[in-house]
Amino acid sequence: MVVIASSLGALLVFQFDRPVIEALSLSLTLFCTMLVLHTVYSRDNRSNAATSSVEQLEERLAEIDDDVLHLEGRLSGMEKDLPRKVQKEVDPLFAEVEVIGSLVKQMAEAMADMEGRIDDQGVALEDTRRQQALLQAPQLEAPQSALAEPALTRPASPSAYAARMAAESLAPQDLDVGLDEDGEPARSTSAPRMPRPDPQLAAEIRAAIDASRVDLYLQPIVTLPQRRVRYYEAYTRLRTLEGNLLEPTQFIAEAERSGQMPAIDNILLFRSLQIIKRLTARNRDAALFCNLSPSTLVDEDFFPGFLEFVRANETYTDQLIFEFAQADVAAMGLIEHESLAALAELGFRFSVDRITDLRMDFRALADKGFRFAKVNAARLISQDENVEHGNIHPADFGALLGRYGIELIPDHVETEAEVLELIEMELRSAQGYLFSAPRPVRADVLQGALKPRAVNTA
């Protein structure tokens, strides 16, 4: 534009002989006109470019809107079809699980029926042998001295005490190795008091003790919800000369009346230590609940030797837990508490079971060494009227005991519904026939266990 304007000015001056001022004015006018035209043209071009960009952007946004609408349609279709497809795939699995459950149930019933028939055949065979023996040998009357109550004397030393317990425990036994399904084991402290003495039963108890026909049964205590075995509880049952089992509800009352419970508890203690030694060889965290009678704590003949024996095995204090019924704990006097204090000083822990009164002073029990408490699961869940709740709701009972350092263990668990209720109560352990029935300890397990070390009393 400058060249054109300059050329026009020079042409007017030199070609047409126009004045310089006029030529310069025309040159400037032409330059300004071309400059204005160029500016207008450039602005139009930029406007057209911006408009084109906006149109392209609108087209892209329209495409994105279409894609979003399509995606929403697909998601809506998936939301409608997914539950139906999942249900269609899961229903066959549920059907197969139900079939497997029914087959397992039928198999369990068949096994139980087979075990019952085997037991019946064994009992019939034993009866036949007994009848043949009675026919072949004359029946002898029991001497009167067999009915007399033997004197329970304290061993001369702890080593003699251990030797006597080992001799009684390791004697040949005709232990049952099957599952006991006659009924739920009763606690040794809950047997009803008999109205009058039974000399014949007392003689049978003494004969069973002398012949080492005191069997040990174990029932596991499992964790929730994993159901791993955490502890075991030991029970004692006596066998008569004919091979019949005496349940705790049958012999405990008479054994306490005749002063034979300390001897039974001592056999239970020794065998429990044998089992603990076997368990700790595989799992150091295993522990065993051992039921004791309060009469053992006050027996002047047995308890001193009992105390020396557990002192000689105090390395197992964490694995052995002594258990007492709540009614017996409430009735304990000064001597019983002194005996508990002597055991607690060695590091042993205690458990209170068969709890029916939630108003008990559990803080005081915790101070005495009680670290576990057991309540019937049905009573804990259904709020049995026979349980004295006081101001504490059963669902909060475990939290209350936890503040005192006592762990609550529901026992007699029999249904899966009870397990769910206990898990909601945030309880960590449980015990009952749902997990396992008490099983007898095999004779070879007891005979293979190590004998407790003797204490040097020199």
Image (tube, helix red, strand yellow):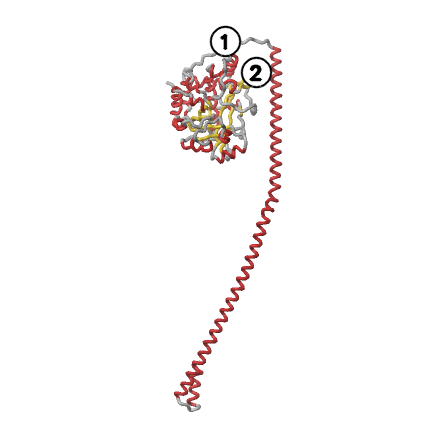
Left or right, residue 394 beside residue 244: left
Residue 89's x, y, as percent?
61, 44
Residue 402's x, y, as percent?
42, 32
Contact, mark 2 vs mark 1 (Cβ under 8 Å): no
Residue at the image point whose x is 60% and y is 25% from the top: 115
Question: Badge 2, how many Cα within 10 Å: few under 14, some, many 20+?
Answer: few
Question: Badge 1, how many Cα within 10 Å: few under 14, some, many 20+?
Answer: few
Q: Quadrant of residue 362?
A: top left
Q: CA distance from mark 2 to mark 1?
A: 20 Å
**Earlier along the polypeptide chain: callout 2 or callout 1?**
1
Residue 242: numbered disc: 2
Q: Quadrant of the C terminus?
A: top left
Residue 442: numbered disc: none
Q: Is residue 52 above or below residue 131?
A: below
Q: Is residue 135 above or below residue 88?
A: above
Q: Residue furthest bottom?
A: 17
Towards the viewer: 306 or 9 = 9
Numbered disc 2: secondary structure: loop
Q: Quadrant of residue 311?
A: top left
Residue 318's x, y, as percent?
43, 28
Residue 395's x, y, as percent?
47, 33
Left or right, residue 283 beside residue 335: right
**Pointer 1 residue:** 145
Q: Quadrant of the N terminus?
A: bottom left
Q: Please give the count of numbered marks on the rendered protein.
A: 2
Numbered disc 1: secondary structure: helix
Q: Is residue 224 above or below residue 292?
A: below
Towards the viewer: 369 or 342 = 369
Looking at numbered disc 1 in the image, what kind of residue is underneath it? Answer: Ser
